[in-house]
Amino acid sequence: METEGNCCFALSRDMRGVAYLDIRAGKINVLGVSEMESLIRAITEIKEDDIIRCLVVTGGNDRAWIGGANIKEMVKLDPATAREFISRVNDLCESVRTLSVPVIAAINGWCLGMGVEFAAACDIRVASTVSQFAMPEVKLGIPSVVHAAMLPRQIGAGRTRSWLLTGRAVDATVAHTWGLLDDVVRPENLDAAVEDIVSAIIECPAEAIRTQKALCNAWEELPLTEAIQMSIGPFGDAFLTDEPGMAMRAFLAKKLGN
């Protein structure tokens, strides 16, 4: 496995084309501008690598996956620098939301503020039973913004309102019940649960996965009738290569063999 990194992350790729981004930004993975920009560069590097099939994001310790934005930096902000700061948060979340391959958040420990927003921007979220989630921005005198806007679609408008207006923490079981998480497992089973998802993804033809993610992203923004109609083109385009033919012939051969 090829590995690289800097002071706040380690990035590795295995022979299957699976990338692993391990966030290592101190004791509880609090992110400031420098850390966010480093992570954006790492994800951009993945974006430019056509061999990558999916990305798994982990935390480098058991205390926190992402412990939020750096309050020591935020306390010094003025209106102009605050917009610059939150723009970096936006850019980091967008880097995974718009990545052409699936992004799996493997959450173990606290996930706070922008950590929740970053998780919301990932495609699949799996957490250990010890994980805790909170959007405490209002307690610090600021609103939850940017990719918090994805939460009403994921957990419902009423629940989002209640959560963001109180800033309260919820455990992984509650987050799973809400729909924020796709699965919750014991800490010792987290790696295996993520591997099951990775294996299912890489068993599928690569271009089909990329197209499906692009469609899922588009469907979130388009009116229903337009979303249905725009799907026709990508279905036809799938047959520009022999990827569907190979997959279908393999399926038929396996079925006939049984």
Image (spheres, helix red, strand yellow):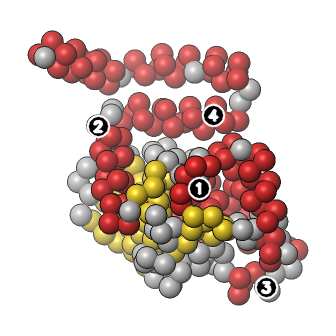
Amino acid type, residue under disc 3 in the picture: Val
How crowded is the residue under tag 3: few (<14 C-alpha within 10 Å), some, or many (20+)? few
Quarter occupied by residue 68 = bottom right
User: Residue 95 location, x and y as percent?
Assistant: 57, 55
Pointer 1 residue: 175
For this rendering, which residue is in front, 172 or 89? 172
Please report whichever mark, 3 or 2, sits nearer to the chain's N-terminal start: 3
Upstream in sequence: badge 1 or badge 3: 3
- C-alpha gap between disc 4 and disc 3: 36 Å
Tell me residue 109's x, y (percent): 50, 71
Answer with the quarter of the image where residue 116 lies.
bottom right
Q: Which residue is mark 3?
A: 75
Q: Residue at x 51, y 67 (%)?
A: 131
- The amino acid type of the residue labelled 4 equals Ala
Amino acid type at circle 1 is Ala
* Nearer to me, 199 or 40: 199
The tag earlier along the polypeptide, 2 or 4, is: 2
Residue 175: image location, x then y, percent: 59, 56
